Image (cartoon, rainbow, N blue to C red):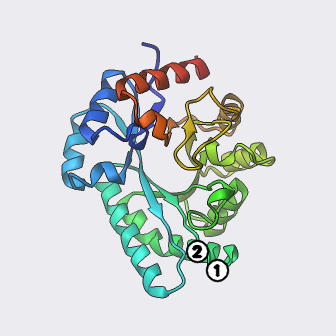
Amino acid sequence: MGDLSRLCIHTITNKPWSLPEALQAYSDQGIGGVSIWQNAVEPYGAKEASRIIADFPLKVVSYVRGGFFPALDQTARRQALDQNRKLIDEAAEINAPLLVLVCGAEPNQSLLKSREQIREGIEILLDHAQAAGVNLSIEPLHPMYADTRSAINTLGQANDMAEAIGSPAVGVAVDVYHLWWDPDLEAEILRCGKNGNLDAFHICDWKSPTVDMLNDRGLMGEGCIPVKTISQWVEAAGFHGFIEVEIFSNHYWSMDQHRFLEMIIDAYKKLYH
């Protein structure tokens, strides 16, 4: 079977599966970890989901996803904070040590203003997160999502914010899909290592041509991202945690998910043999 102890799969990768189906399939293959998406928990509620998860040997790596802090009015920003507190509580309930933040953006205000609101939101949540034992991880997103999904678009920006907040409960998540193009990526990954704030490492590939900018991610090795090289930078930065496969793909969601899982494992083994 090969050593899959560091392999983690996001439940969204096998979106057609229910939470129990995904956990069973991952466990059967000897996969070490799982990152749970909120949509997989929602049908059961966090307490029942926690009981389901406890029946399997998988390590819960993270809960996905919080964030979306920016808004034009204070009421909407307060609602976002309330939603994030709920997600922090759910993360704690399912024993996820990390809540990944897709930080959000508001297209009718400047990116700078959105970043200020993101920092303020994270700082407000800190006490709640620390009391729950859940860390917050800033995930920079590709600039094509800067209108509504995230005003944090480079690892440098994420590092700047994490360092400015200055809490051991706040770090960053590196996703190759969003960051592979960045000429400063190696230096910024090493900066993460120096600061000890590299929380998570997500992999997939960028297909060329890409037919859907959200839901056409590739399986590792079928696109143009130098996943192996970036993995080496992450290792050099001192990160030895889970390697998380996160693929949004209408193509792969439409196929037999057991077959797709076999393809993921094969691609993972080719990268990390």
In the depicted structure, whether residue 220 falls above or below residue 238: above
At label 1, the amino acid type is: Gln
Say the numbered circle drawn on residue 120: none
Task: Tell me which residue sits at (48%, 76%) in the image.
Answer: 124
What residue did someone put label 2 on? 106
What residue did someone put label 1 on? 109
Q: Is residue 128 left or right of residue 221?
A: left
Task: Tell me which residue sits at (52%, 36%) in the image.
Answer: 241
Q: Is residue 54 left or right of residue 34?
A: left
Q: Nearer the viewer, residue 67 or 60?
A: 67
Q: Is residue 170 left or right of residue 231?
A: left
Secondary structure of residue under mark 1 = loop
At label 2, the amino acid type is: Glu
The x, y position of residue 211, in whole percent, is: 60, 43
Binning the other alpha carbons within 10 Å of mark 1 as few (below 14), some (14 to 19) or many (20 upward) gives few
Residue 199 in view in this figure: yes
Q: Please tell me in which quadrant of the rendered image residue 254 appears.
A: top left
